[in-house]
Image (cartoon, grey):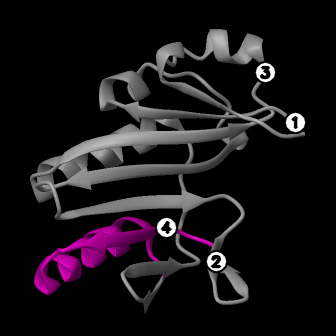
Amino acid sequence: MTRCRYWHLSIEELKKANYDPKKVLIWEIKCSKDEAAHFGVFCYRNGTPWDYESIHGIVFYYNMIERDEISKITEFLKSKFGGEVREKGERVFLADSREIYSPAEIAALATEIGNKFETSVEISVELENFDLTEQEKSNLPSSKLLPIPGK
């Protein structure tokens, strides 16, 4: 199995991307307000761990973000994807929410989040069974490719 991660992607780079959404294991949109205050929105295809179970759906984490803004982020994501809000530590889960994996949908979400919450955004996408031919045809920048060693 060939796994790889493209990181530090811009919205424009992801908009140009062409890959099979079924090959995405995880994507993340990291949103920075300043050096310390940030949050990230992500989705694991196989579910995000919660104790001994996995929860499927959109999740976000936060650091040094005001409680009222956490509520606004939660409301925004819930209005777009649905799901049951569950919190654990500095993570908010939208259990059983709609999931997205296409480059166009992720890029559109990153654009909307960046504009609505006045943050810079950076995107990463991890894919599995993504061979060299697919990498070359993907339009993703090879300079931002991190191969993941393993089987």
Q: Looking at the rendering, which quadrant does residue 137 occupy? A: top right
The residue indicated by pointer 3 is 131
Q: What amino acid is found at the position of numbered circle 1 in the picture? A: Met
Chain-order first, disc 2 or disc 1: 1
Q: Nearer the viewer, mark 3 or mark 4?
A: 3
Residue 150 is covered by the magenta coloring: no
On-image quarter of the N terminus: top right
The residue indicated by pointer 1 is 1
Taking depth in this image into account, of 136 and 116 the one nearest to the observer is: 136
Residue 79 is covered by the magenta coloring: yes
Q: What amino acid is found at the position of numbered circle 2 in the picture? A: Pro
Q: Looking at the rendering, which quadrant does residue 146 occupy? A: top right
Chain-order first, disc 2 or disc 4: 2
CA distance for labels 1 and 4? 25 Å
Q: Nearer the viewer, mark 2 or mark 4?
A: 2
Taking depth in this image into account, of 102 and 132 the one nearest to the observer is: 132
Q: Residue at x 28, y 63 (%)?
A: 39
Q: Residue at x 45, y 51 (%)?
A: 28
Please, is residue 89 above or below residue 13 in the view?
below
Q: Residue at x 47, y 41 (%)?
A: 124
The residue indicated by pointer 4 is 58
First to last magenta residue range: 55-83
Chain-order first, disc 1 or disc 4: 1
CA distance for labels 3 and 2? 28 Å
On-image quarter of the C terminus: top right
Q: Nearer the viewer, mark 1 or mark 4?
A: 1
Q: Is residue 33 left or right of residue 94?
A: left
Percent coordinates x, y for residue 88 in the rendering: 45, 90
The residue indicated by pointer 2 is 49
Q: Looking at the rendering, which quadrant does residue 16 occupy? A: top left
Q: Are marks 2 and 4 in contact (CB under 8 Å)?
A: no
